[in-house]
Image: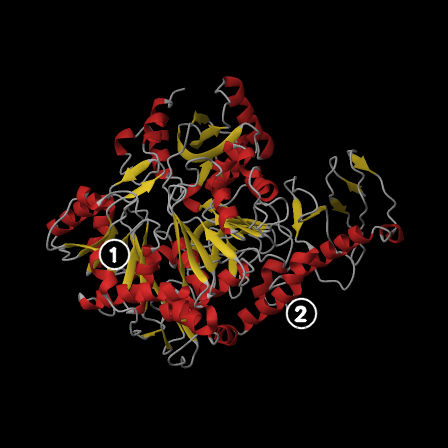
Amino acid sequence: MLSAAAGVGVLLYTREGVGGAAVGGAVGTGSHKSTVNTSIKNHLRFKKLSSICIRASTLFACCNYRIGMASNYLRHGESIANFSSGAGKISRINAVTLGESPASEENDLVLPSDEFCRQALIPNPQKYLEMYKRSVEDPAGFWSDIASEFYWKQKWGQPVFSENFDVRNGPIDIQWFKGGVTNICYNCVDRNVESGNADKIAIYWEGNEPGFQDSLTYSQLLQRVCQLANYLKDVGVKKGDAVIIYLPMLMELPIAMLACARIGAVHSVVFAGFSADSLAQRIMDCKPKVVITCNAVKRGSKTIQLKDIVDTALAESSKNSISIDLCLTYENQCAMKRGDTKWQDGRDVWWQDVVPKYPTSCMVEWVDAEDPLFLLYTSGSTGKPKGVLHTTGGYMVYTATTFKYAFDYKPSDVYWCTADCGWITGHSYVTYGPMLNGATVVVYEGAPNYPHPGRCWDIVDKFNVTIFYTAPTLVRSLMRDGDQYVTRYSRKSLRVLGSVGEPINPSAWRWFFNVVGDSRCPISDTWWQTETGGFMITPLPGAWPQKPGSATFPFFGVQPVIVDDKGIEIDGACSGYLCVKNSWPGAFRTLYGDHERYETTYFKPFPGYYFSGDGCTRDKDGYYWLTGRVDDVINVSGHRIGTAEVESALVSHPQCAEAAVVGFEHEVKGQGIYAFVTLVEGVPYSEELRKSLILTVREQIGAFAAPDKIHWAPGLPKTRSGKIMRRILRKIAARQLDELGDTSTLAEPNVVDQLIALADC
């Protein structure tokens, strides 16, 4: 049988038994339901629709293909056997084809178009399974073949990798390509110049104010990197020294990262939104030789004086006996002139006064694959930031490979990731991953909705962006502004979309797909972490159907498992704690200066596994659904409820633009559910709407998940990268208003005052 809403071409498959054929047919537009002859012969009259039907059954059956030897590593694809014809055991699958009809239902199975599949790097599940099988059966051979595509001054020795993943067997130790000698900057820039891409655009830069733009070819980028590298060497920065980079999204930020990598220095990029205290913490921890910053930056209509923040941080560090002798400062003329910048003679140096004087060629410092590449500090439950340490060789190979396949990258693509390089997404998928593939990257300095909510799509059209990678928070924000700010722009260049940072709720996924992507662009909904270095579970466009909101299946070499409270692996459809067994090349190697904390946080909770800290559900079809951080799981009357599940239900309400859920102390339930709700523009707060939102959650999840408190929120406290600061929301929910902590990293600090004012409304 086949049914669909009016005008929506949806295939509904019914199970015909083991090996039975899938049944489908054409839907007449303008009717809510259409009855069709279930004869396969009659379906074949609809040539195009039949090909969709066959492709759907083939794709889905292959996604659930069981390797004959029944090894544990393909546990994510064991729910349905592979049949040479027919759909096999498929119960109730809605299938829509990209470009044919909009995704509309929660259980949609969204198929890539024939044309996309024909051109995709991984065109079908068979190819994925072939590569995945080898990646977990023969990881040394699989990753060696890929690593050989890059330049190595000296090839690695044997074994290709070594690991101790179990704290019960001694200290955790991970090494890949040990003994191999290479340089990631050389592979990002020089190799592209030498291969004939010298005149290809490496970076398009778009300023905060419309009309301010610039670009660098790979040849020009190499020259700029070399000049800064030579300067750093001249002022005494050597291999292994740390350099703090506190810059906004200017071209100088990736230039500084690459320059450090070129000379073997360890860069630590600090997001140019962190407070002076946060910056000082990082300076005191890694003790850099140099701090690189700029005088100021414009973010929307607001000017942020970064140099003042650095001055305060350096003064604080000095009080703790960590003195920095050099602060290299870039003059960002669009934001502030030199004369208005506070200055300390003898320590502060203008970038433009010194760096351009240096030679445009610089010898490469060749490093071992396991030599440190960068430190990136991430928040910890104790309040002290954790210095995640990534090394060179494995990270290089893994980020390049994940970028290539997860975005189906082609040399003609123009790629834009909206993340800041102060976060791991900016490291892996603004700078290193794309440039290792010779990609053209868009770097945008400003706010995504400035000076109007259509700015993103204006930039997409301006540079003919083909791959657009952003956070669900931004997607929901743009949803709230209205479709008109999207549809007034062409966006015809787009072919792949991406989501990063948190689980994307199905309604936001569908809006992103239907409105932004015109129902034709696959969405790579990626799950990974600062610690993993690159994507771990992600769709591969063209390889298999997608389910809105699901991260789908693991990347090559990644072996995810779901475990219970006791660390026992759970098979089949289940929910639990997401762990990974066995290492992958991009894994971080330690926490800087604190290997014990590294082991305690990530490897001791479930010995034998890397513990992600995330909750996860695997459905009956083997698809993975991230449910948020485990510490964002609320235990209500014995029911463990993921905050992401409640948020998704709230956002499905047509008048809810965004929601953030936290737990709070409840005298009866132990913990209650406290929901901060942002409404669609123009919708007033009302008691009726409050009840309607609670009813939506009751209907979608159950009465036990109904929010105890709806807190109206004109906005949510977010960093400028779009991350919701839930620790602030927890304090507001608990009325611990004197413990809000540092709010200087927020994009709109006044949002906190607004939330406090509405606390009892």
Q: Quadrant of the rendered structure where residue 66 is?
A: bottom right
Q: On the picture, is 212 further left or further right than 573?
A: left
Q: Amino acid at mark 2?
A: Gly
Q: CA distance from mark 2 to mark 1?
A: 51 Å
Q: On the picture, is 105 further left or further right than 465?
A: right
* Location of the N terminus (image quadrant): top right
Q: Nearer the viewer, residue 425 or 550?
A: 425
* Residue positioned most to the top: 687
Q: Is residue 530 visible?
A: no
Relative to 735, does residue 342 appear above or below in the rendering?
Answer: below
Please give the name of the residue rendered at 64% of the width and 45% of the height, measured from the top-left corner.
519
Proximity of marks 2 and 1: CB atoms separated by less than 8 Å = no
Please give the name of the residue rendered at 48% of the width and 34% of the height, measured from the top-left corner.
658
- Which of marks 1 and 2 precedes in the sequence? 2
Q: Is residue 649 visible?
A: yes
Q: Nearer the viewer, residue 453 or 640?
A: 453
Please give the name of the residue rendered at 32% of the width and 27% of the height, measured from the top-left corner.
753
Query: Pointer 2: residues within 10 angstroms few (<14), some, or many (20+)?
Result: few
User: In the structure shown, which secondary structural element does the residue marked by tag 2 occupy?
Assistant: loop
Please give the name of the residue rendered at 14% of the width and 58% of the height, measured from the top-left corner.
325
- Residue 527: give x, y in percent of width and height: 49, 53
Q: On the picture, is 236 further left or further right than 599?
A: left
Q: Which mark is residue 68?
A: 2
- Residue 553: give x, y in percent of width and height: 57, 57
Query: Pointer 1: residues within 10 angstroms few (<14), some, or many (20+)?
Result: many
Q: Nearer the viewer, residue 611 or 59?
A: 59
Residue with the mark numbered 1: 244
Relative to 608, does residue 425 appear above or below in the rendering?
Answer: above
- Residue 414: give x, y in percent of width and height: 50, 56
